[in-house]
Image (spheres, rainbow, N blue to C red):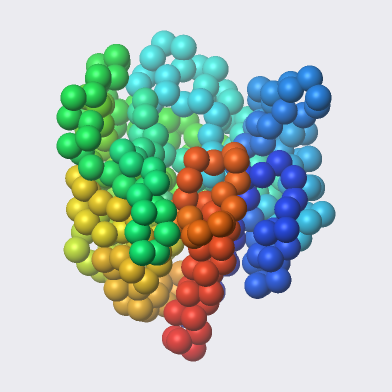
Amino acid sequence: MLDFEIAEILVEDRPNKYWKMLNQIGVHKAVGILPRKPVDWRMQIETEPWNYFTLSRYKNMLRDNGFELIAIEDNPPMNNIKFGLENKEEELNNVAKLIENMGKLKIKLWCYNWSAGIGWSRTSTHINTEFGQVSGFNVNDIEKANHYNIKTDAGTLWKNLKNFLEYIIPLAEDYDVKLAMHPDDPPIDSFLGIPRIMNSIESFDKLLELVKSDYNGITFCQGNFTLMTENLSDAIKHFKNKIFFVHFRDVIGKKNNFIETLIGHGKSNLKEVMKAYDEINFNGILRVDHVPTLEGDYTPNEVAWGYSYLARLYTIGYINGLKDSLK
Ligand SMILES: [Mn+2]
């Protein structure tokens, strides 16, 4: 039976009319970020937004405006941890603080990634399509780009990930916060000279074996997993209850060259996808991921692109329709 919760990612530092619209179409849960916005007119930036007080105030702001904060999809700086550099201790302490404070505030899921150096990336940001402006990636566009100035290899990234999980999973268990690894986006072999390791079905199998725990799981970002396999619904059935969090989106193309799409226009068979979630009794958290910007739509200033509201509302309707069709 399908029993998942739709939660929307809210990146703004104050309520807006679209939050109300989300409430009106039945979305009352939120995935949050770390609230880094200036807190007063001196433009004083929140330097440690993983602290209890800051997270608590953020959670209250969401609560007072119709949303329960149930997940955080953001992290303190982690590059030193990922690369295994000497000054990683401070970063580890900050991640530990985040997990502890999330636990105290009953925010029970943390979405993180192991993309070292460079996070999710696109080579084009405003491609006009029949279904709005979308982002895309073409590896040819970065052929001549300078490489990142740190050398590492896949083995080192795996070793550092194992060390990290051995340190953080026991804390996550104590504080009842589930870890959900997001794939490298795009899931290519290396990016500007830095290997990527969370980029295949097999690599996620390996992640789950590294540290066995009910708190070690996956963010099933459909837009990435559909670039790793020809059969997205089989991948869902494969990972079963290790899928803690779903990013619902779609793409056209291959991992070296793709564009994002309005839901229903991509390469995945979404009806089969929803049936697969039904079959595994998915009861985690699901959010809409990147969407096209429709004409005149509003995209929060806090994010680059892909989070305009009208197409998100459209996608939620689409998801509810798929879900209802299985009742
Ligand atoms: Mn995603």
Q: Tell me residue 69's x, y (percent).
A: 67, 52
Residue 233: % across, % down: 29, 70
Q: Residue at x 81, y 24 (%)?
A: 41
Report whether residue 104 is seen: no
Q: Quadrant of residue 181?
A: top left
Q: Residue at x 73, y 63 (%)?
A: 20
- Whether residue 78 is visible, yes or no, is yes
36 or 209, nearer to the observer: 36
**Left or right: where does residue 298 sit relative to residue 183?**
right
Left or right, 293 with reference to 38: left
- Position of residue 281 relative to residue 77, above or below, is below
The extreme top residue here reads 86
Q: Along the horizontal axis of the image, is 148 left or right of 324? A: left
* Residue 251, position as x, y percentages in the image: 31, 58
Residue drawn at the location 80% of the way across and 26% of the way down: 40
Q: Is residue 134 left or right of residue 255?
A: right
Residue 70: image quadrant is bottom right
Q: Give the x, y percent position of residue 37.
A: 68, 32
Camera-nearest residue between 208 and 91? 91
Residue that appears at 46% across and 17% down: 88
140 w.r.t. 206: above or below = above
